[in-house]
Amino acid sequence: MAQAVEFIGTGRRKTSVARVRISPGTGKITVNKRPFEVYFPLESQRMSVQQPFVSTATTGKFDVKINVHGGGPAGQAGATRHGIARALLSSDVAFKPLLRAEGLLTRDPRMKERKKYGQPGARKRFQFSKR
């Protein structure tokens, strides 16, 4: 019995982590066992997720299974995009210049800054009183 070819990529953004599996197929995308259109209702998030396929001209050539957790919808969409780009890279090394030019392989390092003790937030200070 022939083993199905599957390429794996892990994507991260903010506090979200996406585990992506792509295999040659018809372009069906499922996120946490739900259709991609249901999980990401906003068009901007859907475009973000599909960007690696558009930039490498592989739209509709891979079936995608995604497990994503942590963070909110925007962070999860970014993590998914990063994971898909990494999985495409493992499927074909020739995609590297295309994905790199679009900035899809770079992990976005921006995270929420931690709250410091003795103040109400990360940067905000309590009101100063001279007397």
Image: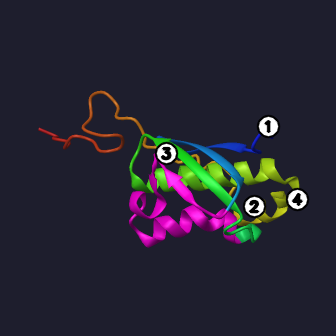
**Residue 8 percent coordinates (x, y):** 69, 42
Residue type beneath disc 4: Ala
Q: Which residue is denoted by mark 1 in the rendering? A: 1
x and y, in percent, of residue 82 in the image: 63, 52
Residue 105 shows in this picture: no
Front one among 4 and 117: 4
Q: Dot 2: what SS?
A: helix
User: Which corner quadrant holds the N terminus?
Assistant: top right
Q: Residue at x 68, y 69 (%)?
A: 59
Q: In which quarter of the view is residue 52 placed? A: bottom right
- Of the image marks 4 and 3, the number of the one nearer the N terminus: 3
- Label 1 neighbourhood size at 10 Å, few (<14), some (14-19), many (20+)? few
Q: Which residues are magenta?
A: 26-54
Residue 117 is labelled as: none
Distance between the Cα atoms at labels 1 and 2? 34 Å
Q: Residues within 10 Å of mark 4 (few under 14, many from 20)?
A: few
Callout 1 touching callout 3 (CB < 8 Å):
no
